[in-house]
Image: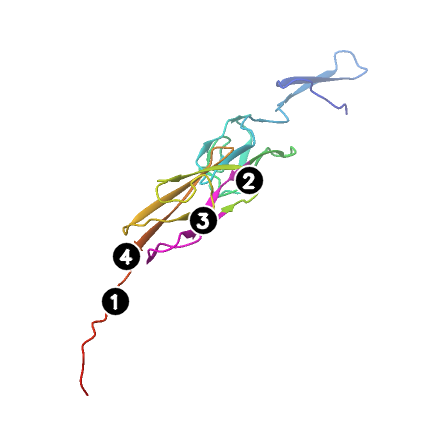
């Protein structure tokens, strides 16, 4: 019982002949060895993407006799083909497993890292009397991620070069401001706020002489 170790991915037919001591008394048989590759190719690399994530077409190739399965299946257009489109649900890793009966499973993975930058103007839309400047507190998430920012418009802001600035406008009206943040990957986060400064209320007291 010899052991066959094929060196290339090609079907080969092997023959065995059994001979008896008696002349012309022999028999021959054969078998076909169907050889499949021991791997497949996932060309799509690990990817860093912006929030909200989009849809990405997988690039992969492998033997058509393998059965393919993607896990998890959420966001995968068809988990039973080798090259589906994937819409990541967030930062995470997708596995693709190729299988064939009586052969070890072959597994590759791709990881999507979702980057997001949020700028939260803490104060809500506000009406107030014209007086001193109103501080505009902002929380940026993630706090340690490098980013650039811009305010629009800049009129009425005490210092538009600062993300933590203040609003002051001596005229009553409705003023809407937009804050835009962008991280090194180019991901964008936005927020806005509306301020409505109101004129002061003047109360006049008219006194009249009265006799009691």
Q: Position of residue 144 (x, y in %)?
A: 57, 42
Instruction: Give the residue at mark 1.
Output: 203
Q: Is residue 122 magenta?
A: yes
State the CA–CA distance, disc 3 to disc 4: 28 Å
Instruction: Give the residue at mark 3.
Output: 120
Q: Are marks 3 and 4 in contact (CB under 8 Å)?
A: no
Q: Position of residue 120 (x, y in %)?
A: 45, 49
State the CA–CA distance, disc 3 to disc 1: 38 Å
What secondary structure characterizes most of the magenta part? strand
- Which contiguous range is marked in magenta? 112-139
Depicted 62 relative to depicted 189: above or below: above
Disc number lying in front (4 or 1): 1
Q: Quadrant of the N terminus?
A: top right
Q: Secondary structure at mark 3?
A: strand
Local crowd size for mark 1, using a 10 Å CA cut-off: few (<14), some (14–19), many (≥20)? few
Q: Which mark is residue 145?
A: 2
Q: Is residue 159 magenta?
A: no
Disc number lying in front (3 or 4): 4
Compare marks 2 and 3 and give the one earlier in the sequence: 3
Compare marks 3 and 4 and give the one earlier in the sequence: 3
State the CA–CA distance, disc 1 to disc 2: 51 Å
Instruction: Give the residue at mark 4.
Output: 199
Compare marks 1 and 2 and give the one earlier in the sequence: 2
């Amino acid at each position: 019982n010899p052991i066959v170790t094929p060196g290339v991915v090609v079907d080969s037919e092997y023959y065995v002949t059994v001979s008896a001591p008696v002349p012309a008394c022999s028999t021959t048989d054969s078998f076909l060895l169907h050889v499949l590759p021991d791997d497949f190719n996932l060309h799509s690399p690990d990817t860093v993407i912006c929030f909200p994530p989009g849809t990405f077409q997988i690039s992969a190739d492998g033997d058509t006799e393998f059965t393919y399965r993607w896990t998890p299946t959420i966001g995968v257009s068809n988990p039973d083909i080798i090259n589906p489109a994937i819409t990541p649900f967030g930062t995470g890793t997708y596995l693709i497993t190729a299988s064939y009966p009586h052969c070890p499973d072959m597994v590759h993975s791709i990881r999507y890292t979702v980057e997001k930058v949020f700028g939260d103007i803490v104060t809500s839309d506000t009406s107030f009397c014209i007086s001193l400047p109103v501080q505009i507190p902002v929380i940026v998430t993630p706090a340690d991620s490098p980013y650039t920012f811009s305010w629009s418009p800049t009129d009425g802001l005490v210092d538009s070069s600062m993300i933590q600035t203040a609003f002051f406008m001596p005229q009553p009206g409705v003023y809407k401001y937009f804050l835009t943040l962008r991280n090194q990957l180019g991901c964008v986060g936005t927020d806005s706020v509306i301020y409505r400064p109101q004129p002061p209320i003047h109360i006049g007291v008219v006194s009249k002489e009265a006799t009691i």
